[in-house]
Image: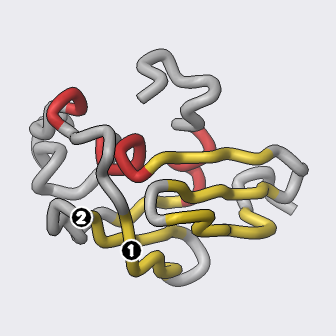
Amino acid sequence: MQENTPRAITRTDPSKVSIEWDDGTKTVYSAAQLRAICPCAKCVDELTGIRILDPQSVPADLTQSNLNLVGNYALSLTYSDGHNTGIYPWKMLRERDPATADDGR
């Protein structure tokens, strides 16, 4: 099995999403952390790859709802700020684990 494949995805409350990976590693994201790394075209310039959304502008008390699988490769969510266009591939979620990320947000 690939190490970037989730075994279980749990929306523990409106502000947290937990992912248990096939290798047993567990990643926990807050809604604010996920929103801050949103890869959609509204948040990242499609041509340059430069982040448009300032991660520091994301409210810490942001919540999420409508957690959905996108095929067999990603998640999508709706946030309390109305944003809902991000698709979060497994590989990105694994690589951007807040426990190992530099920004920790």
Q: Residues within 10 Å of mark 2 (few under 14, many from 20)?
A: some
Q: Is residue 101 left or right of residue 18?
A: left
Tell me the quarter of the picture where residue 52 sits.
top left
User: Which kind of residue does numbered mark 2 sit on?
Assistant: Ser
Task: Indicate the position of residue 24 as horizontal and vertical percent values.
Answer: 89, 50
Dot 2 or dot 1, earlier in sequence: 1
> Which residue is depicted at the point 39% across and 74% down?
65
Q: Quadrant of residue 4?
A: bottom right
Badge 1 marks a residue whose secondary structure is strand
Q: Amino acid at mark 1?
A: Ser
User: Which residue is depicted at the point 23% across and 69% down?
Assistant: 85
Q: Which residue is mark 1?
A: 65
Please name the residue that numbered disc 2 is placed on.
Answer: 80
Crowding near the residue tagged with mark 1, few <14, some 14–19, many ≥20 C-alpha atoms within 10 Å: some
Give the residue displayed 30% in from the left and 71% down from the top.
78
Percent across and percent down for residue 27 are: 67, 45
Q: CA distance from mark 2 to mark 1?
A: 8 Å
